[in-house]
Image (spheres, rainbow, N blue to C red):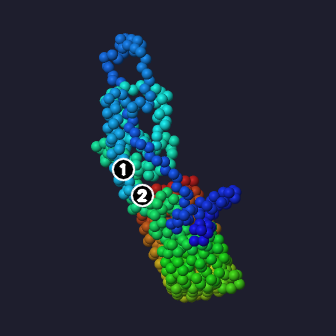
């Protein structure tokens, strides 16, 4: 790699408070990215490992206790009259006293030499990276734990002994063994790896009969490590890879690098090419918010043969970028958001035989031409373009939402060019007319979902869509009671939304498959008549002129008609209706009691709310 093996160019997206912090952030990100490429040339010099100190055995003995003399005056006199006992220093604990102590010390020295010889013969074959250390549990009784557990002296224990003048007598029954804790009191964790392994071996040799039962596994198997790393993002993977060689090898597994997510990240061209060259099985790539993303893709396109999903965002994308996508035969999803397409004076063409989903959202372009024979889903939502040309014979879903610059003719030509179209969203396209809807109904016989909300020029009269299942006509000023005749022609309609249709005065529908209907903020709406055996949800709100409601359904269980001040006539034939809320319906009379009585049309009724009613 250029620059002597050092990698430059990957930085966090945030702004630093100073030049020095920016340099530190750049170096840290550079180091983390180098880990993903398996480069270790940037490592700092290794910390020198101090030589292990000779293993020592610390023993503490206490004076023999005489229960008969305890608390007696004679014992007290013997203590006061006896000559003073010289204080026993901490260094005397292993010096001992008498011939027995000298003999014990000789035996210990011989055992220590034997242990050192065994360790010297085994250190050459021991693999410290793959060793599964066994550590005795804290508090476990042991007959020979070395004092220099990690090859370090314990000066704080020396100072403690000398300061307090420990007085110890010789008694084998009171002998105590001390082993240093794995974690120092000050929280330090800078113990060298090799020294730690020697201490572990000492614990294994000195463990009691139950050492195997109390052992603690300190390492992680490759399978478990792989599972844990699968929950980490790429930035955390790079940081984890700096821990040790085993973690670095695990973090570089290709399973974690099939989805390259560089969203809002500054990355150099050379680094990006190197990563794509190393991980050529990448299936997902996210470059949203990356500067010069177009040049990154063009330079590394030869290494992205297995790419299936590409996400781009912001910046400029020219004709060269879309032509380069032909080098990715497996690409099936392309998302481009908040970008400028083309040079602004020429048409942008997207031509890919394997593309199944294309989303161009909130982009700026003059003319767009899409020629994808396998395309199933196309979204041009909120894209400012004056013309669009489609050659997508397999297209099923088309989204033109908020394409204000598209003319009525352009939408008509684009939609009618897709004979298999099943879902069409042209909400907030103010230029759409009933003529366009009729043309689409004739060309797209399988259209089942239509969203024409916020289209003021639509009345939906004489529009016949027999396969329609979901119809949304919210905020359409041209919708009137005459429009319901065309709606009734859709016999398999299941969901209908008519919110904010200010000219709508009445709704009378007899649809066998209607399940949901929404009628919100209809200022002139006065009469509602619904008949459907599967009707299960009715939303009626802010209809101040509503006077008559007639509902027939076997699936409706809850009916809420709150604050309908003009409601005076209610007829229900709902055999499974359980809850009815008529709060603040001030115009209701006693006739409502006949409807909701035992002989009415609601035999399963359990809850009735009539708050603030004049009944």
* SS category of the residue bearing label 1: helix
Q: Which residue is mark 2?
A: 129
Q: Where is residue 29, by image quadrant? A: bottom right
Q: Where is residue 125, by image quadrant? A: bottom left
Q: Is residue 301 left or right of residue 457?
A: left
Q: Nearer the viewer, mark 2 or mark 1?
A: 1
The circle drawn on residue 314 is none
In the rendered image, which quarter contains the C terminus?
bottom right
Q: CA separation, marks 2 and 1?
A: 17 Å
Q: Residue furthest left?
A: 209
**Position above or below: 510 against 120:** below
Q: Is residue 96 left or right of residue 231?
A: left
| Residue 354 visible in the displayed image | yes
**Position above or below: 106 against 589:** above
Which sits in the foreground, 16 or 51? 51
- What's the residue at 61%, 81% (across, down)? 321
Q: Residues within 10 Å of mark 2 (few under 14, many from 20)?
A: few
- What's the residue at 59%, 66% (across, down)? 6
Q: Is residue 127 left or right of residue 422?
A: left
**Position above or below: 320 against 615:** below
- What's the residue at 43%, 26% (across, down)? 88
* SS category of the residue bearing label 2: loop
Which sits in the foreground, 590 or 36? 36
The circle drawn on residue 119 is 1
Q: Position of residue 350 (x, y in %)?
A: 59, 84
In the rendered image, which quarter contains the N terminus?
bottom right
Q: Position of residue 406 (x, y in %)?
A: 66, 81
């Amino acid at each position: 790699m250029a620059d002597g093996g050092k990698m430059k160019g990957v930085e966090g997206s945030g702004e630093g408070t100073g030049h020095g912090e920016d340099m530190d952030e750049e170096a840290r990100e550079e180091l983390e990215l180098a880990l993903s490429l398996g480069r270790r040339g940037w490592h700092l010099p290794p910390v020198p490992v101090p030589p292990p100190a000779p293993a020592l055995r610390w023993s503490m003995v206490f004076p023999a206790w005489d229960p008969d003399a305890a608390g007696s005056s004679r014992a007290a006199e013997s203590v006061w009259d006896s000559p003073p006992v010289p204080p026993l220093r901490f260094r005397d604990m292993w010096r001992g006293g008498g011939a027995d102590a000298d003999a014990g010390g000789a035996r210990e020295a011989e055992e220590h030499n034997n242990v050192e010889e065994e360790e010297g013969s085994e250190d050459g074959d021991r693999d410290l990276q793959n060793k599964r250390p066994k550590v005795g549990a804290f508090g476990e009784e042991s007959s020979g734990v070395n004092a220099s557990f990690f090859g370090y002296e314990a000066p704080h224990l020396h100072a403690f002994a000398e300061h307090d003048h420990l007085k110890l007598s010789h008694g084998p029954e009171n002998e105590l063994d001390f082993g240093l804790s794995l974690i120092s009191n000050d929280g330090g964790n800078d113990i060298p790896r090799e020294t730690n392994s020697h201490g572990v071996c000492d614990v294994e040799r000195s463990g009691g009969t139950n050492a195997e039962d109390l052992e603690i596994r300190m390492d992680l198997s490759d399978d478990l490590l792989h599972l844990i790393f699968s929950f980490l993002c790429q930035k955390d993977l790079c940081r984890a890879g700096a821990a040790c060689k085993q973690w670095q090898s695990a973090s570089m597994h290709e399973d974690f690098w099939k989805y390259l997510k560089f969203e809002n990240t500054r990355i150099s061209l050379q680094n990006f090419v190197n990563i794509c060259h190393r991980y050529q099985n990448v299936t997902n790539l996210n470059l949203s918010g990356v500067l010069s993303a177009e040049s990154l893709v063009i330079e590394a396109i030869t290494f992205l043969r297995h790419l299936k999903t590409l996400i781009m965002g912001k910046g400029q994308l020219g004709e060269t970028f879309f032509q380069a996508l032909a080098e990715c035969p497996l690409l099936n999803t392309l998302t481009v958001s908040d970008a400028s397409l083309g040079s602004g004076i020429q048409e942008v063409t997207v031509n890919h035989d394997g593309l199944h989903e294309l989303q161009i959202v909130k982009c700026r372009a003059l003319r767009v031409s899409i020629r994808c024979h396998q395309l199933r889903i196309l979204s041009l939502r909120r894209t400012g373009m004056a013309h669009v040309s489609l050659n997508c014979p397999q297209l099923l879903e088309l989204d033109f939402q908020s394409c204000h610059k598209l003319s009525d003719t352009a939408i008509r030509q684009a939609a009618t060019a897709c004979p298999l179209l099943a879902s069409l969203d042209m909400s907030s396209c103010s230029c759409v007319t009933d003529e366009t809807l009729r043309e689409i109904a004739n060309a797209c016989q399988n259209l089942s979902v239509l969203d024409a909300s916020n289209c003021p020029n639509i009345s939906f009269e004489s529009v016949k869509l027999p396969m329609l299942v979901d119809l949304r006509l919210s905020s359409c000023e041209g919708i009137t009671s005459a429009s319901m005749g065309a709606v009734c022609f859709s016999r398999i309609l299941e969901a209908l939304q008519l919110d904010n249709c200010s000219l709508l005065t009445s709704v009378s529908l007899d649809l066998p498959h209607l399940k949901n209907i929404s009628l919100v903020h209809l200022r002139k709406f006065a009469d509602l008549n619904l008949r459907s055996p599967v009707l299960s949800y009715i939303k009626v709100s802010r209809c101040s002129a509503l006077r008559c409601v007639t509902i027939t359904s076997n699936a409706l269980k809850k009916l809420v008609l709150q604050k309908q001040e003009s409601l005076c006539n209610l007829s229900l034939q709902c055999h499974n209706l359980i809850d009815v809320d008529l709060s603040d319906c001030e115009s209701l009379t006693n006739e409502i009691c006949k409807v909701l009585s035992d002989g009415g049309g609601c035999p399963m009724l359990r809850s009735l709310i009539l708050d603030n009613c004049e009944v």
